[in-house]
Amino acid sequence: MIYRTYRADTYKEAVLKAKMELGNNIYIISRKEVKEGGVFGLFRKRQTEITVAKKEQPDEIGRKSPVIKKAPEQMPVVRDEQIIKELNEIKARLNSLTVKKEPASENDIFRPYEMMLRQNDFSDDYILNLKSAFEKEITLGDIKDQNTIKKKIIDYITGGLSFSGPIEAGKDRPGVVVLVGPTGVGKTTTIAKLAATFGVLKRHRVELVTIDSYRIAAIEQLGKYAELMQIPFNVINSREEFKEYLKGCSAELVFVDTAGRSQKNNMGLAELRSILDGARRKLDIHLVISATTKYRDAVDIFARFNQLMYEKVIISKLDETNTIGSIISALGKDRKLSYFTTGQSVPDDIELASTKKLIDMISFDDTILNRDEMAV
């Protein structure tokens, strides 16, 4: 048997192409709809693909066909040049209608942008969602303009981010700011920076609290910061202690440090939740997460710390990484960014969260400008 595959805009055109090449005695083996062409998944042309089979003739497999002599009048030779000409025109037209799929390296305009996002550690799901959003709004004119595509990428990224703005001091009673998060993300240093910013630089009445009976070194470190800044410092060990402390507190702002908890330590997180509930009031809870956290770990941290009912996120250690895509990919729209930390210096290396800082960390200009060199 001889097997061939043909593509055309319609099923009839595909069958016609097959018959023109193999003759009428063909069998249709399969039929399916396919897409070809387009740019980064857009404007692709739908076609019909068929697979046909034809039984090989004896002379096609090396056997000599018997010669049957017939009278000349039984073998008329028809030479209709007009029919042949029309068939050739139809064949040429079908060939012109068939879109030839070019290599992705030449035709996929989005490829360098996708590579850029991957190099900046954005997740596969994030990139797929971004491409889907593009498909709904991009035009043929847009794909020719690198600046337009770059702007749309930035708009998509920033459009998925929310910001809380600065911490506000309490009026009738203290504003209570609580920092929670995994071990090693820099909560203690961050709480010291916030206390210095609001207590020393902005001259609010500030007090420091730690709910951490596990790390003696952390308690001593925070106590030393409080002493240097001349800020009251308290160690809380239980739900009742926290409740009684807040009753007698006259500060405008209370900054609460907590012990680092693994996101997998459900018992530890529940214990901390119980102590915080002793406040019997609304708390300003910020989850601190390191910018160096891998995407899947970040997704897990954001989800498991939900039981502490945090609404804001502080991204720490921006100075220790060149990419931020993993955190942006995992963040989601419901969580608001509050502050970024960029080093160990107190109180200097902390700043209000902003889109500019994150976009500045996404390096894609060189990738886009050299996209022709990257296409292989």
Image (spheres, rainbow, N blue to C red):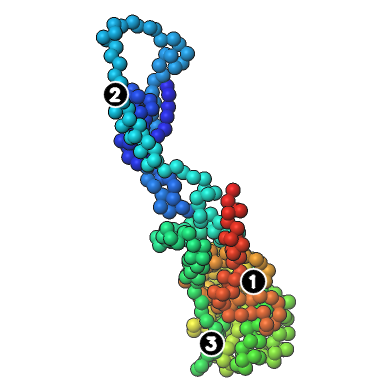
Q: Position of residue 142 (x, y in %)?
A: 45, 62
Amino acid type indicated by mark 2: Asp
Question: Within 10 Å of the Cα at label 2, are there few (<14), some (14-19), or many (20+) other Cα atoms?
Answer: few
Amino acid type indicated by mark 3: Glu
Is residue 66 placed above or below 311 in the rendered structure? above
Q: Position of residue 24 (x, y in %)?
A: 32, 24
> Which residue is farthest front?
81
Q: Residue at x 29, y 8 (%)?
A: 72
Q: Between 274 and 232, which is closer to the camera in this rendering? A: 232
Q: Which residue is mark 3?
A: 168
- The mark that comes first in sequence, 2 or 3, is 2
Instruction: State which mark lies toward you, 1 or 3.
Output: 1
What numbered label is drawn on residue 318?
1
- The mark that comes first in sequence, 1 or 3, is 3
Q: Which residue is mark 2?
A: 80
Is residue 225 placed above or below 36 in the rendered structure? below
Query: Could you tell me how far apart the alpha carbons at marks 2 and 3 are, in whole angstroms?
Result: 92 Å
- Quadrant of the rendered structure where residue 175 is? bottom right
Is residue 132 left or right of 269 when viewed as pictured?
Answer: left
Q: Residue at x 51, y 93 (%)?
A: 171
Is residue 234 placed above or below 109 in the rendered structure? below
Q: Residue at x 29, y 24 (%)?
A: 80
Label 2 secondary element? loop
Tell me whether circle 2 and circle 1 mark residues in contact (CB < 8 Å). no
Instruction: State which mark lies toward you, 2 or 3.
Output: 2
Question: Within 10 Å of the Cα at label 1, are there few (<14), some (14-19), or many (20+) other Cα atoms?
Answer: many
Amino acid type indicated by mark 1: Leu
Q: Between 31 and 331, which is closer to the camera in this rendering? A: 31
Q: Position of residue 372 (x, y in %)?
A: 58, 54
Q: Residue at x 57, y 77 (%)?
A: 353
Label 3 secondary element? loop
